[in-house]
């Protein structure tokens, strides 16, 4: 029984560490270059990381899950476009985020903009129930555009 518990704990730790390995960029031009080189889509997460409850739910229910981490590693370059209330961003990062918000006409949080490897918008999502499976199914639809 002890061996089973240890094995389960080790497996759970491995799954959690996989999800934690997601790399979120903050520079869209660098993300687009990486996506083009790796033939991946770019996922822009417009978030209010320290105040938006739906953003927190999306992060906890989808982005922090191992199934999403596995999907993202194969298909996505991730970009966080944050609009925090309590955390301070550099003036340059704030200006870049504001410009992206204006470009993609983002009016609420969370908003997920999906770009193909050429930088063309192919999808727009928000919070949805169903965890990683529902979310990645929507991303797969965007991939076909």
Image (tube, grey):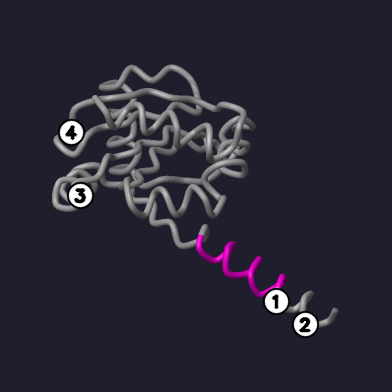
Question: Of callouts 4 and 2, which one flags the residue occurring earlier in the amino acid sequence?
Answer: 2
Precedes in sequence: disc 1 or disc 4: 1
Mark 3, residue position: 30
37 relative to 53 in the view: left or right: left
> What's the CA distance linking mark 1 and mark 3?
40 Å
Q: Residue at x 63, y 36 (%)?
A: 57
Q: Residue at x 18, y 39 (%)?
A: 117
Q: Position of residue 62 (x, y in %)?
A: 55, 42
- Residue ID for mark 4: 119
Is disc 4 surrounded by few (<14), some (14 to 19) or many (20+) residues within 10 Å? some
Residue at mark 4 to residue at mark 2: CA–CA distance: 49 Å
- Compute the Cα span from label 3 to label 4: 12 Å
Q: Nearer the viewer, mark 3 or mark 4?
A: 4
Q: Position of residue 12 (x, y in %)?
A: 66, 66
Which of the image's four quarters has the N terminus? bottom right
Query: What's the magenta region?
Result: 8-18
Q: Which residue is mark 2?
A: 3
Question: Is the residue 50 above or below the residue 139 in the image?
Answer: below
Of residue 26 and residue 67, the one placed in the foreground of this image is 67
Q: Give the Cα distance between marks 1 and 4.
A: 43 Å
Q: Which of label 1 and label 4 is nearer to you?
A: 1
In the image, 141 versus 60, the foreground residue is 141
């Amino acid at each position: 029984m002890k061996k089973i518990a240890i094995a389960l704990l080790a497996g759970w730790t491995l799954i959690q560490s996989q999800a934690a390995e997601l790399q979120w960029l903050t520079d869209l031009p660098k993300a687009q270059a990486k996506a083009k080189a790796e033939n991946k889509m770019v996922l822009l997460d417009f978030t209010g990381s320290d105040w938006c409850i739906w953003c927190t739910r999306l992060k906890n229910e989808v982005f922090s899950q191992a199934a999403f981490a596995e999907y993202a590693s194969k298909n996505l370059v991730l970009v966080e476009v944050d609009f925090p209330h309590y955390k301070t961003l550099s003036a340059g990062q704030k200006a870049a985020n504001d410009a992206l918000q204006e470009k993609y006409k983002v009016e609420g949080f969370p908003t997920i903009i999906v770009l193909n490897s050429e930088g063309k918008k192919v999808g727009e999502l928000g919070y949805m129930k169903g965890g990683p499976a529902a979310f990645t199914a929507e991303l797969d639809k965007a991939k076909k555009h």
